[in-house]
Image: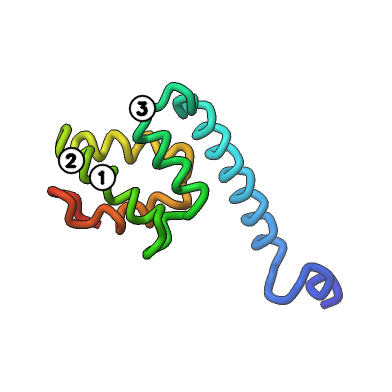
Amino acid sequence: MFGRWRRGPGLSKKDLRDLKHLRAYNEKEEQLRRARRTPLEDLPPLVRELVGLGQATSFREGTAGDRRARAIGEILNEAGGIEAMRDAYELAADWIPHEVLTLQNTWHNIGDWQA
């Protein structure tokens, strides 16, 4: 009874072990993502700008970052269609993994892009 109290409410030894494994897995995935990403200075200028916008504004709706990210999506679509957008998205995802879902929504209905 007291062992459970020290660990916290609702966390069994198995839960704690699973949480430890999950944290280790996430750390390993983060290291792999960082190792495979293209160096920032080698990214195409528009992708580099997307990364900067994502880091600064997280593409929040109604911000200048949101509007510029949408404009970049339109430029990419005109230049190479959805393939150019996908390539840029994948490069940016290695740098701003938590913001790319918002970027998907920002680019919704640009060309063939669907969030």
What amino acid is found at the position of numbered circle 1 in the picture? Gly
Crowd class of label 2 (few under 14; some 14 to 19; many from 20; radius 10 Å): many
Q: In this view, does 114 lie above or below 49?
A: below
Find disc 2 in the rendering and name its residue. Answer: 77
Q: Is residue 15 above or below residue 21?
A: below
Q: Which of 39 and 22 is in front in this view?
A: 39
Name the residue: 69% across, 59% down.
16
Where disc 1 sits, the SS reads helix
What amino acid is found at the position of numbered circle 2 in the picture? Asn
Give yes or no for contact between labels 2 and 1 (Cβ–Cβ under 8 Å). yes
Residue 88 falls in image quadrant: top left
Find disc 1 in the rendering and name its residue. Answer: 73
Q: What quarter of the picture does the N terminus occupy? A: bottom right
What amino acid is found at the position of numbered circle 3 in the picture? Pro
Q: Distance between the residues labelled 2 and 1?
A: 6 Å
In the rendered image, residue 100, in percent from the top left (x then y), is placed at 39, 49
Q: Is residue 48 above or below residue 14?
A: above
Name the residue: 33% across, 40% down.
89
Find disc 3 in the rendering and name its residue. Answer: 44
Name the residue: 30% across, 56% down.
106
Q: Which residue lies furthest to the top in this view?
A: 42
Which of disc 3 and disc 1 is earlier in sequence? 3
